[in-house]
Image: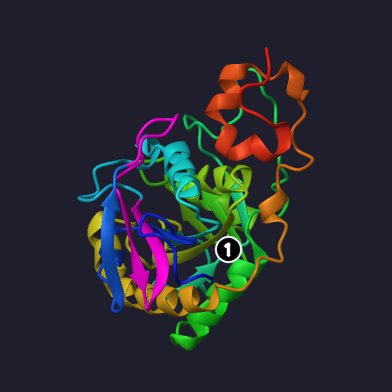
Amino acid sequence: MAKGKAVNQAEIAIIGGSGLYEMEGFERVREVRMRTPFGDPSDALVIGRLDGLPVAFLSRHGRGHRLAPGEINYRANIYALKAIGVSRVLSVSAVGSMKETIAPGHVVLPDQFIDLTKRRASTFFEKGMVVHVSMADPICPQLSAVLAKGAENAGATLHRGGTYVCMEGPQFSTRAESLVYRGWGVDVIGMTNMPEAKLAREAELCYATIALPTDYDCWHESEEAVSVDAILGTLRKNVDLAKRILKIAVGLAGEPRTCRCGSALQYAILTDPGAIPAAAKQRLALLIGRYVGSKKGGR
C-alpha cells in the first residue's frame, strides 16, 4: 500500500460507528463531503492516516446515529468510497447472537449472508443495464484472513466463519422470528450488512465484516429480551476491542489483492455495450468504464 496517497484518497475504508474515528494513531487529514449519482452518503468521509497508511472512515448511520438501517443510502456510501480509490472495505457491525457458544463480547467474522431486507436499493445496475455478479462467497477471503489475524493478535474470543442473517428492522425480531432464524442454523443477526456487501461486490471492492455480538436476540430463555440499553452497554465495551483489531488489520491489509473481488464484473454484464443507454454509461462510468468503454457510447 502506497504511503504517498493524496489527502483525499485512501485504499482502505472502515464503515461503522463514528466512535471508531477516535483511534490511537489515526491522524485526521480532512473531511470530504461527496455527491454521487445515487445521492449523498450517510456522512462526510473522514480521510486520514492510521500509522502512516491512508484510511477513510464512514459513519454508516451518520454522526449522532441519525439514520435507521432502512434509511441508509448504501449505494451512495459504496460509490463514494470507490470514487476516492478504496479497494478494501472493513465493516464493523453490532449483531445479536443466535448461538449459545457465541457470547456477547465475542467477535464473529461471518462468511455468508441471508438477506431478508425488503425496501432497500440493492444494485447499482438498472434502467437499461442488467448485471448478475456472483454472491456465492460474499466475503473476501483475503480480507477476512487479515481481520482474523487482527482479532487473534488483539486477544479477542474469535469465531471464524458463520452466517449473518440481515433483517429489515428497525424493530427487533419477534420470538417466533428469532426461533425460526435459529432453526436455520444462522450464527448472528443484524440489520446493516445487506445490501452493503452486495454493492461492494458490484463495485469490485473487497469486503469483510467484524460482527460484534451484543445480546442473544430474544430466543434465549434464560436471558432478557434484547433492549437498546443492553446493546449499548455491551457495544461500548466492544468499541476498544474493535479499534485494536482494525488497527492491526489495516497494517496487514496492504498486500496486493489475490482474490477475485477486483474483477467481479468481468463476466457479469449481460447487456450488450451498444444497447446500454448513454445516461447509464455516464452514471456508472466509475464502475463499468473498463468493461464497456467510453461513457459517451450507447444510444
Going by the picture, which residue comes out furthest to the left? 64
Q: Is residue 109 left or right of residue 275?
A: left
- The region drawn magenta spans 34-59
What is the x, y in percent for residue 114?
A: 60, 47
In which quarter of the view is residue 208 placed?
A: bottom right
Q: Is residue 225 magenta?
A: no
Q: Is residue 50 magenta?
A: yes
Q: In percent of the image, x 44 and y 30: which residue is there? A: 38
Seen from the viewer's position, the closer of residues 118 and 80 is: 80
Q: Which residue is mark 1?
A: 110
Question: Which secondary structure lies at badge 1?
Answer: loop
Seen from the viewer's position, the closer of residues 12 and 71 is: 12
In which quarter of the view is residue 125 placed?
A: top right
What is the x, y in percent for residue 169?
A: 40, 41
Q: Is residue 67 left or right of residue 267?
A: left
Q: How many marks?
A: 1
Quadrant of the image for the N terminus? bottom right
Q: In percent of the image, x 71 and y 31: which residue is there? A: 292
Residue 105 can be seen, yes or no: no
Picture layout, residue 198 above or below residue 230: above
Seen from the viewer's position, the closer of residues 159 and 243 is: 243
Q: In percent of the image, x 23 and y 51: which residue is there? A: 63
